[in-house]
Image: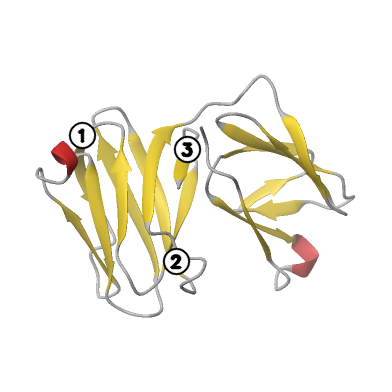
Amino acid sequence: MIFSILPERVATILIGSKPVIVTFMSVVLGVGGANTKSVEVLKKDEFNQGQTIIINPKKKKIDESLIVFTKERSYEFFIKSSKAGNAHNFIKVKSGKINAVYKKKKQASNYNYFEGDDSIKIENTASYPLIINGIEVKRQEYFSKGIPLFISTQNKLPNESVIFVKEAK
């Protein structure tokens, strides 16, 4: 799976009972948070010339934050427990950008989903705001490509739906 992460956006990593291997495009200088009773983050220079971290689950219920500092930039992640079929195994992280061209991929009752090479665009077609990955979307918003999107409405928060976005190129 490739995550093309836009600047100042948080990506969610879904973790099951097995470790998740995350590789970046540049050397990982350090990690912050997430070394708790729930997960352990391993960073060693021997892992892919210092470009890879391994996230080991220690508990079944995980809800943690992680910041990874690379030579190029920093990335923020939420680490959440998930069923084995939805959990990530291997993730390649690259810097994303807002694209100039998007292709419409899905039309739902309350939003349109557009896909670009490095990012996605969600257009809200409802008369109420949508909450997508914690961001209120009144008209349209851009999101990182490859990450899971959690979509809910302000008046129906328990009815959250998840879209798994195709990976970036």
Marking on residue 27: 1
In this rendered view, identify the residue nearer to me: 83 or 135: 83
Residue at left 18%, top 41%? Answer: 48
Marking on residue 5: 3
- Judged left or right of residue 128, residue 135 is left
Q: Position of residue 104 (x, y in %)?
A: 78, 35
Give the spatial CA distance, label 1 vs label 3: 16 Å
- Judged left or right of residue 4, residue 31 is left
Residue at left 30%, top 43%? Answer: 23
Name the amino acid, label 2. Answer: Lys
In this rendered view, identify the residue nearer to me: 95 or 139: 95
Circle 2 SS class: strand
Residue at left 69%, top 54%? Answer: 131
Q: Position of residue 139 (x, y in %)?
A: 79, 39
How many residues crowd mark 1 within 10 Å: few (<14), some (14–19), many (20+)?
some
In this rendered view, identify the residue nearer to me: 39 or 22: 22
User: Counting residues from the N terminus, which is met first, the one under dot 2 or under dot 1?
Assistant: 1
Circle 1 SS class: loop
From this view, report whether residue 24 is shown above or below residue 158: above
Q: Quadrant of residue 122?
A: top right
Circle 3 SS class: strand
Name the amino acid, label 3. Answer: Ile
From this view, report whether residue 109 is shown above or below residue 68: below
- Judged left or right of residue 1, residue 102 is right
Give the spatial CA distance, label 2 vs label 1: 25 Å
- Judged left or right of residue 157, residue 118 is left
Q: Position of residue 61 (x, y in %)?
A: 41, 78
Give the spatial CA distance, label 2 vs label 3: 18 Å
Residue at left 44%, top 66%? Answer: 80
